[in-house]
Image (cartoon, grey):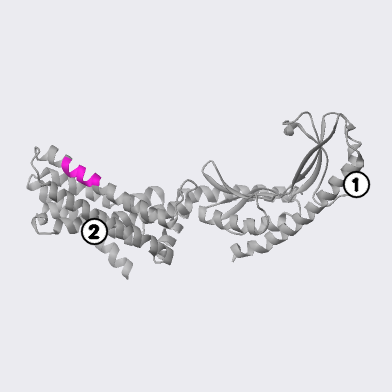
Amino acid sequence: MEKKLFVVSSRILEIFMVVMAILSFFKKDWLWVFACLFGFLLSISPIIMKRNANFSVHWLIEFLLVFTISLHVWGGVLNLYSYPFYDKIAHFIASGVVAFFALIIVYVLDVFSPRVHMDLVTLGFFITIFTIAMGAVWEIAEFTTDTLFSAGKPVAQISLKNTMWDMIADTIAGILVGVGGAIGIRRGEFKDIIIYLTNETKKSKFGAKFIDARNKALSSLQNAIVKGEVDDRALPIIEKINSMADFFTTSSCSGRIALMEIPSFGRKREAKNLGKWHRKIKIEEIREVLSKASKGEIWFFVQSPIFHVSTVSMENAKKLLDLAIQSGFKNSSIKTLNGRIVVEILGTERIDVPLGKDGKIYVDFEYIEILVSIANKMMERIDRNLKRMERNINKLVK
């Protein structure tokens, strides 16, 4: 019922704005004809956004937008600015609404964009400064309209005192909303609006791209599972991550020991795998595969588990990153790839050492035995971290 009341009120105010434009036209007050029509177009921008971007603005935000514009239209067309304090009240309300819009938009961007991050203190400060800046832009607009439409006669900006009190009203509104809004977000007082906008963002074109990429990745993964190309140790974690609608894996490996023959350092793509194991190994296995070496540098590797997980928001990415680090994957990080948010889950276990070249081993097997012993201890730790990660992911699934 509350939603319906605000939506109907918004439509009535928009109709009234058109009526104000018609009234101004008959009065030949071209400034306010333009202001009314521009205000009307701005008021229906949420409807345009819903049609073109499949993004629906929260009904309270839409009402505040229309009401704020209407205040200034009424002030000009109905000469309400001549009443004491109407101008200051209108400025204060408008600046407060602008600050509130900026607060919600920046917070949602912080959740979804990999390029925006603000803590609540910085957010409050930014909103305050932004509102003051918008107040300055408004005063410049008033000066411009007086110059263009009133031949320089002060109509909108009647005096320096008027301008300064407008700026003071803007500043007070910015401080109150900036500080109060940041505290409100911390307390969860705007939770309903933020959840609504979050869900709408997921349904928008941004969300559609994520869903399309997710579907393709899951299809590719299923084909890899059928072909036996996904190692069993990684599969439980992969399946749990992909069971959540806001995440999907793009590549993964549960960690391995490997022996490779590489033409020269840095040419890993042309490497020949002599042997690879997703488990602990025995020295005899190393002896056997080394006998196959013939040409190129011989390298012994221990490679940590690595999972690349794409997610719909930075908020989700931070949660997964914290979970991965708690599980022992200390080298994990958040990356952005072509606008996508990707969490790279990566451990610290790693060995990269050369053993020989062109079939000749330049180290004794006592040294190789030490490498194998260290590698096996790393594999044991990798197993513990994988099991811990699998358990901890349940925190996100719930």
Residue 55 appears in view: no
- Residue beneath disc 2: 93
Seen from the viewer's position, the closer of residues 2 and 252 is: 252
- Labels in figure, total: 2
Magenta region: 136-143
Residue 283 position, x and y percent, is 90, 46
Residue 383 position, x and y percent, is 76, 57
Residue 70 position, x and y percent, is 20, 56
- Residue 133: in magenta span: no
Q: Which quarter of the image is occupied by the C terminus?
A: bottom right
Which label number is shown at residue 283?
Answer: 1
Q: Which quarter of the image is occupied by the N terminus?
A: bottom left
Q: Main secondary structure of the magenta part?
A: helix
Amino acid found under the numbered disc labelled 1: Ile
- Residue 139: in magenta span: yes
Task: Please give left or right for residue 31 compared with residue 195 in the image.
Answer: left
Q: Residues within 10 Å of mark 1 (few under 14, many from 20)?
A: some
